[in-house]
Amino acid sequence: MKTKIFTTLLLTLSITGCQKQPDQSASANTTDPVAKAQFEKSDAIINTYLDKLDSADTPQTERTQILCKDYPTEYKTNYIPALLKLSPTEYTRAKLLKDLDIALDYYKKKDNVQC
């Protein structure tokens, strides 16, 4: 009885031990470091803009500047291209532009900003 269990266990371990593991280092190397750095920098800038828009202390003129010029420019020129380089299968330009419009519409209504 013990030999059957030992043989079965040994066979199971040898089969699972011989299976090829996914190559994680190859997928990590496919990430473009320039695009990743651009994305992280742009994401930090956009988060700063959103923090200012969420703050009650931000003057109306600065809100207008962010919503009408700074945020859309940063999003379109840096954030979208970097994100599409990093995850081309997960995102499309049209989807990201739609997300931008949704965010801008929300803050424009909330802060009563006309561009």
Image (tube, rainbow, N blue to C red):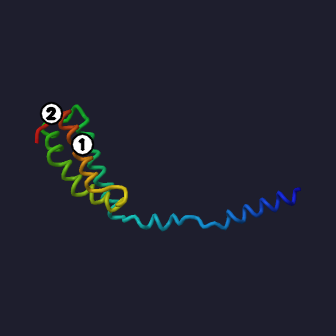
Find residue 95 and report its horizontal and vertical position in percent: 28, 51
* Residue 101 image-quadrant placement: top left
- The outermost residue toward the left is 115
Would you name the residue on which mark 2 appears? 112
Q: Nearer the viewer, mark 2 or mark 1?
A: 1
Find residue 20 and report its horizontal and vertical position in percent: 60, 67
The residue nearer to you, when weighing 34 against 109, is 109
- Name the residue at 28% across, 53% down: 42
| Mark 1: amino acid | Ile
- The local crowd at label 1, few if under 14, some if 14 to 19, many if 20 or more residues have their Cα within 10 Å, is few
| Mark 2: amino acid | Asn
Find residue 18 and report its horizontal and vertical position in percent: 66, 67
Q: Secondary structure at mark 1?
A: helix
Find residue 36 and report its horizontal and vertical position in percent: 35, 60
* Residue 50 image-quadrant placement: top left
Does 16 appear above or below 54?
below
Q: Is residue 93 left or right of residue 62?
A: right
Q: Earlier in the sequence, mark 2 or mark 1?
A: 1
Rounded to the nearest whole Å, what is the CA distance between mark 2 and mark 1?
A: 15 Å
Where is the N terminus found, in terms of image quarters? bottom right
Would you name the residue on which mark 1 appears? 102
